[in-house]
Image: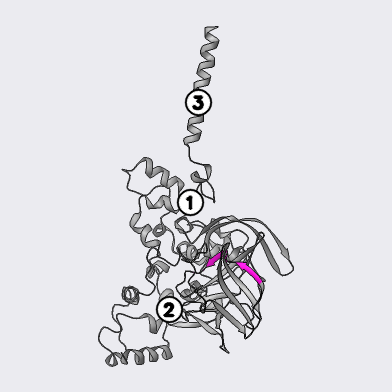
Amino acid sequence: MKRTQLLIATCFVLLILGLSQCMDAPPESALSDLRGAAYAGADACNKCHQDIHQSWLATAHRNTSASPSPATIKGSFEPGKNAFHYRQNVKVQMEQRATGLYQVAYMNDVEKQAFPFGVVVGSGRKAQTYLYWLDDNAFQLPVSYSVNAAAWVNSPSYPADKVRFDRLINIGCFECHGSYIERKGTQQEGNRQVDYFDKSKVIYGMDCERCHGPAAAHVNFHTAHPEEKQPQHIALYKKLPRQQQLDLCAQCHSGGHTSHNSIFYFKPGDSLSQYFSSAVQTGAKAGNLDVHGNQYQLMTASACYIKSDVLTCTSCHDPHVQERENLAALSQRCTTCHTSVTHSFTQQLPANAINSNCIDCHMPALPSSAISLKEEDKTEANANLVRTHKTGIYADQTKAFIEAYRKR
C-alpha cells in the first residue's frame, strides 16, 4: 500500500514539474524560423554581430519590403497630398481608415473600390509600390510613390488613363524583395502562373540568412562555445569560388527567370542552374540588357570584369552598409585596380573631382525601359534611372558631369 502511494505521489510531482516546464517554455513559433529548424532568424545574429546588424538595418536590402504603416509608406496621406488623378473626375486616394491604410478609387467623388495596403515593396530610396491581398492571392495596387518626384504616381504595368486593381503578383516578386513567404499552392492559368500564399507567414526584407545561409547550427555552436572565435557551421563567402560568389547575388540581380526551385532556399555554394530553368547568360551573350535587374549580366560584360580574375560584386559593394550615395567611398574602390589613370579633360576640373567620383562618368544612371513612373498631369512617364553596371566610357554623361561640376 505504501509503495503504491509513493508511486502515485512521485507521478504527481513529475506531472507538476512537466506542466511547469511547459508553462515556462516559449511557444514553438519563438523557437523556430518560418523556413525551418535550420534557420535562426536575423535577431539571433545580433547577439554576436551587433555592429554589422545595426548598419544592416539601414540598408536597401533590409528595407526592400515591409508591413504597411505610416512609417514604412513614403507617400503622404494628408488631404491635398494623398491622391493621384487619372482624369478630372477619376482618382485614387490614399486614406487612413479605422481598419487600416487604403487606396480608394473614386469617380465623380463616389467611391467605387477600396483595397487595403498589404505589402510595401521597395526600400523607398527611389520609389515604392504596394500590394494588396484578396483571399490567398497578391495583387499590385494601382498607385505607387516616387521619392524623386515626391509624388504619387501610376504603378508600373498599369494603364495611365484608368483605374485597375487586377495585376496578379506571383512568388518571384517576394523572392527578390523578401526572405520568405509560405506558398500554399500554385497553378497555371493560360499564360500566367497563379500562386496562393499564407500572408501570415512572411519574413520581410532580405535578412542575414538569405546571403549567409541557414545559421541555426552556427548560432547554437557559438552560444555553447563562446570562446571559439573561428566561424563554425556557416558558409564563408570569401572562401567560395568566384562564380559561386557571383551566383549568390545573381539569384536576384540578373533579371526575371522561370524557376523550378524557389530561391528562398538558395544557399552559399549553390549554383543558379539548381534553381533556374534556363542558364543565365553572361556578358555579351546576354543580348540587349535593361539597367533594371540585370546588374550581373552588365557587370560581366564590362572590361573591368573580363580583365580581372577576382572582381565580384563585393569588390565594390559592402552589403552590410548603406552607402549607395557615398560616391567617394565607391570611387576609392575603383582606384584599387586603376591606380594611375589619365583623363584628357583633367585640366577642366579641380584636382580631386575625378578621384572622388568615378561613378557618374563610368557607371551613369541610365533610363530603364522596363520600369517607368507616370505623374498625374504629365503626358509622358518618367523613366526610372538606374546605374548601369557595365563600366565604360559614356561621352554624353561625362560631358554633363563636367558641365554640372563647373557650375558649382
Horizontal relation, residue 72 to residue 354: left or right: right
Mark 3 against mark 1, which lies toward the viewer? Answer: 3
Horizontal relation, residue 138 to residue 342: left or right: right
| Secondary structure category for the residue under label 1 | loop
Mark 2: few/some/many CA within 10 Å (<14, 14-19, 20+): few
Residue at image mark 1: 214
293 or 76: nearer the viewer = 76
What residue is drawn where x is 63% and y is 58%? 197
> Which amino acid type is marked by label 1?
Pro
Is 309 above or below relative to 232? below
- Image coords of residue 240 (percent x, y): 43, 58
- Image coords of residue 405 (percent x, y): 32, 89
> Which amino acid type is marked by label 3?
Ile
Q: Earlier in the sequence, mark 3 or mark 1?
A: 3
Residue at image mark 2: 303
What residue is drawn where x is 34% and y is 55%? 50
Q: Where on the picture, by quarter, is residue 242?
A: bottom left
Instruction: Determine the CA span between mark 2 and mark 1.
Output: 35 Å
Q: Which residues are the magenta region?
A: 113-123
